[in-house]
Image (spheres, coloured by chain):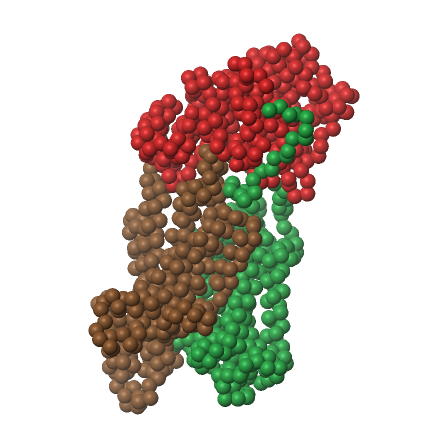
Amino acid sequence: MVASPSGERAVSAPTRRGTARRLVTGNRQTVAGLCALGVFAVVALLAPVIAPTPVNTGFSNGFAAPTAAHPLGLDGGGFDVLSRLVHGAQTSLLVGLIAALVGMVIGGTVGFAAGYFGGRTDGVLMRITDYFLVIPDIPLMIVAAAVFGQSLTNIMIVIGLVYWASTARLIRAQVMSVRQRTFVTRVEAMGASPLFVLTRHVVPQVTPLLVANTVLMVANAIFAETYISFLGLGDPSVMSWGRMIQDALDQGAVVAGAWWVVLPPGLAVTLVVLAATIAGQGMEDTLNPRLKVGHLAVRRFRVRPLHGALGRP
Amino acid sequence: MTTSVTAPLLEVRDLGVDFDIGGGQLHAVRGVSFALHARDRLGIVGESGCGKSTVVLAMMGLLPPNAEVSGQILLNGVDILAGGDSSMRPHRWCDISMVFQGAMNAFNPVRTVGDQIAEPIRMHRKASRRDADDRVAELLDMVGIPAARAARYPHEFSGGMRQRAALAMALACGPKVLLADEPTTALDVIVQAEILQLLRRVSDDLGVALVFISHDLPAVAQVTERVAVMYAGRMVEEAPVARLVSAPRHPYTAALLAAIPRPRAAATVRSIPGEPPRLDTPVVGCAFAPRCPSAAEVCRITEPTNTVDGDAVVACHCATPAGLPR
Amino acid sequence: MTPALSRIWFALVTVFVAATINFFLFRVMPGNAVSALRCRACTPQLREALLNRYGLDAPLPEQFVRYLGQLARGDLGISIAGGRPVWQEITGPLLNTLPMLIAGTLIALVLGVISGVVSSWRRGTALDAASQWTSLACYAMPTQWIGLLVLFYVAAAVGLPAAGIQSATLGVLGDASMWDVLADRTAHLILPALTLGIGSYGQYAIIMRSAMLDTLGEDYILTARAKGLRDRDILRYHAFGNAMLPMVTMVALSAGSIVAGAIVVEDVFSYPGIGFAAVDAIGKRDYPVLQGIFLLLTVAVVVANLIADLIYVRIDPRIRSGRVAFG
């Protein structure tokens, strides 16, 4: 059908360095999301320094509204909420990052192998991936955490071990699509070794997508960690936002009307997950812009009014 | 305003379409004018990007939001363009309808073909389901499709049948004007011939005025009585088909005719050198001048105006009444 | 093997895989199910006896075979903490959860569809942006936190019960009719279902918007406009039907996350459903119950996927008739 002329520029083939830069800066969403994540990361790294008080020091017997000394007040156990929040950032971000990396490594490897070798390897690997895709992820994590949990390292591994499947599928599809492109078959026909093809062509084309997907997985991992800690399966020796939400519930913050205990941890999780999701989606958009014309639009075509003299009825 | 019996059914006056693309404007159609009477069959030919599809989309009011339209489209003397989209909507399908390029996808895959043909009938004519179904059977019969096929889904039709069904759908509300945008592209030759024959028959039997858009001049010549040639958004020549083919006045028309491959010709195919101009900059002089074998100095400076020559119209500085020397 | 049969076979194998993971998880952990059990009254002798009773001191292959045999008979084992068969422990809660889960999913679907349709129709406007941001924000919020917010701000304001499944006063001052019970139960499930719906609708909104945008760019939409249809008719009769197809798949894919949401929602609202039972079992480290619940949830999700697959095949005419075009 007739396509309307529009202003998109042709997308040129990306260079390696250009892709990395484009991925990070090419999209306003990505930049905003990454900046927000950066802020949280800085807070997390500097937690011991910027937390106003030590985490486990009690200041009273129960809830206390925010004051200058305790900007977010005290929770039901008398602990300073802001300090707990800041320390919780460490846990959430660390878990998010490591778990996402674990998932990326497993998923990426499986995806690469399946996509590159095809055939029976592909069949077997994809079957396994499919099982993991269908089995409900968080319940599985809960069960695994119930068994192995109570340690931060284990939590990170458990989350990564459950979330790798969708990455595997994505990477496999991308690897297969790259392999089938003409320039790759041409290079292979010229006698290039599989390793050459892999490193010079497949990897550069697939890595950006892998990075975008990992950022999205950070969001999922932080989300999952919140669930696990909320259910009491987290590491009891570290503070985490999920645990703070659980405490808010257990300590009766709702009944006590202590909004300063209820709002901050959930808000923090929401903001971090939002930032990571936006950044990841922005990256995916940069790599794969969806330029679609829509036939129903709010505005219609404009009609230029007649200038005077043609006035026939 | 004349009310004589030769008043045109549809008149397009000085139609212009500009598209607003990021950082500039694309002048897709410039100053196009023509008139249609009942039973007229007009062909519009030109290469890709010359603006012919844009003209018919403008006539239906189906341009995208970044389009700016100027000029007038008079249906029975009333300018339906003036009020924008909402003033055109009541006329759609009942007065002017369209068969789209690539009718393969013009049907919704999850609804039956019969349903979709009946849809405008039930909407515009407020017909009952049974009456609509009767009419659908009638329409399918007219285009040579067994009525039982109405209950089938689009993917169950072959390309040629889908095109015919699209034609049946276009005729559903008894329009006075039918716009056919490249109806035979992507069909094989035999099916093409059938569709062309069908278009002729429909126009004769139903008195529908037909506008046939194509880049395929021979196909257009088989169906239409008059042909308009478009180049770079302008109509450069409009003439009765016989005269256009035998004695073209515009160099572009002559080049188009010369470029048609003939089965027994010994000579190689003569293509037109160069490329059509970019439409995002205003044209200086005649748009065809860079590629024209008979271009003169005046052609690069002044844009030619429309010269009426008997029953033809040409826009060329060098046009002669007897046709161009070959 | 027909497509339908192969999907059913896949579903069965998936459940088997889940059961196997289940089995090995609890045999690989440090200690064993009994040593991990948290009960104050458990002496070492009692733990020993329990070990013996549950056959946890038998060799691994033998345990596995016995486990599979039990599963085949529908026996999910015996709750270590309670001593009763796991089935008994979870049937009641399961029946409590179902209405809440269905209501929550429906709320999420309605919200998601509306958000997606509005967004796509008014693409590029402030309404689109607002709608997208709202659904993204709700998607990013932990469902348990939404529950807390609902408890905090909504429950008292609306006067709906915020805990449990039945009012304590029901039936105390005279017999409660079936209608009374029904009304009471419904009142109790509104807030949890609402929370679940708000927390889950984000993904539906995203998919709906995307599907609608894809659909609205198709040629047949332009044809519909050419026919003189109004925007709302086009949306209703052409765009919506096509866009709902991917939604069917999405509902199946989201079953896992909805179930996860249900677990925490029940915890927040003390709603005695299967999620609450799971949280309880976690607290006590009652592994057989936890295993049983996980297996049950997996089966539910697998079945949901299967149904969605089979429905999709039936509702998409292109796949359903599958006949080659002729003529």
Task: Tell me: residue C32, above or below residue A282.
Answer: below
Instruction: Find residue B174 and report its horizontal and vertical position in percent.
Output: 42, 25
Rendered brown, the chain in question is C
Rendered green, the chain in question is A
Locate the C terminus of chain A and report the quarter of the image it occupies: top right
Task: Tell me: residue B117, above or below residue C86.
Answer: above
Instruction: Find residue A213 and report its horizontal and vertical position in percent.
Output: 53, 59
**Is A159 positioned to the left or the right of A215 in the image?**
left
Q: Please name whichever residue, B115 or B283, is drawn nearer the observer in this view of the structure.
A: B115
Residue drawn at (37%, 58%), measured in percent from left and top? C106
Say which colour chain B has. red
Residue A128 appears in the rendering? no
Residue drawn at (42%, 19%), measured in percent from left and top? B206
Q: Please name whichever residue, B232 or A140, is drawn nearer the observer in this view of the structure.
A: B232
**Is A301 positioned to the left or the right of A121 in the image?**
right
Residue drawn at (54%, 64%), measured in percent from left and top? A274
Residue found farthest to the right: B297
